[in-house]
Image (cartoon, rainbow, N blue to C red):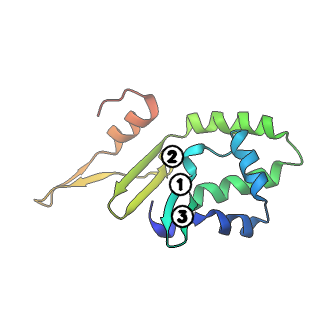
Amino acid sequence: MEEGNLISKRELLSRYGISYGALYRWKRKGLIPDDWFIRKSTPTGQETFFPEALICERVERILETKNEVLLDDLAGELSGEERRNAFLVIDTPYGEKSFKLNDVRSVSLVGTDGKKTDITKQVKDYLSDGRNTL
């Protein structure tokens, strides 16, 4: 994911006023997927980062519903959503970027000849029905 699209654990905890313990409790309960915890080397050592849009949306939802719904119930609901929400992930030398499949409008390949080929349907079919063939 691109640097601008990541948020550090420190920034996340500060922004939402949550504790380190709460964050990892949510992880253990399955409220936050393991693969959202991205370890990176920094000048001060290893730090944990998250895809900013995904983690902020999730933390806000947890905070909004934590007094109304049991965390275990919310985890079950969210895990069902994760299965329904496939992601398109683009990985480049400049970082990785994730998109919810439902948010993708089109995907195109542009060849060296400048010809643009729309592969949206193939990508959505592949991600949504698990055929695993393009």
Residue 102's disc number: 2
Counting residues from the start of the chain, the first of labels 2 and 3 encountered is 3
Name the kind of residue labelled 3 in the image: Leu
Nearer the N terminus, badge 1 or badge 3?
3
Secondary structure under tag 1 reads strand
Q: Which residue is mark 3?
A: 6
As measured in the structure, the alpha-carbon distance from the residue carrying label 1 to the one carrying label 3 is 9 Å
Residues under labels 2 and 3: Cα distance?
A: 21 Å
Q: Secondary structure at mark 3?
A: strand
> Where does residue 3 sit, x and y in percent of width and height?
47, 68
In this rendered view, identify the residue nearer to me: 118 or 24. Answer: 24
Which amino acid lies under the numbered mark 1 shown in the image of this protein? Answer: Ile
Residue at image point 32% right, 38% down: 122
**SS type, badge 2:** helix
Residue at the top extreme, as displayed? 131
Image-based side of 32 in relation to 100, left or right:
right
Q: Is residue 66 visible?
A: yes
Q: Viewed as shown, does residue 85 lie left or right of 14?
A: left
In the displayed image of the protein, which residue is found farthest to the front?
45
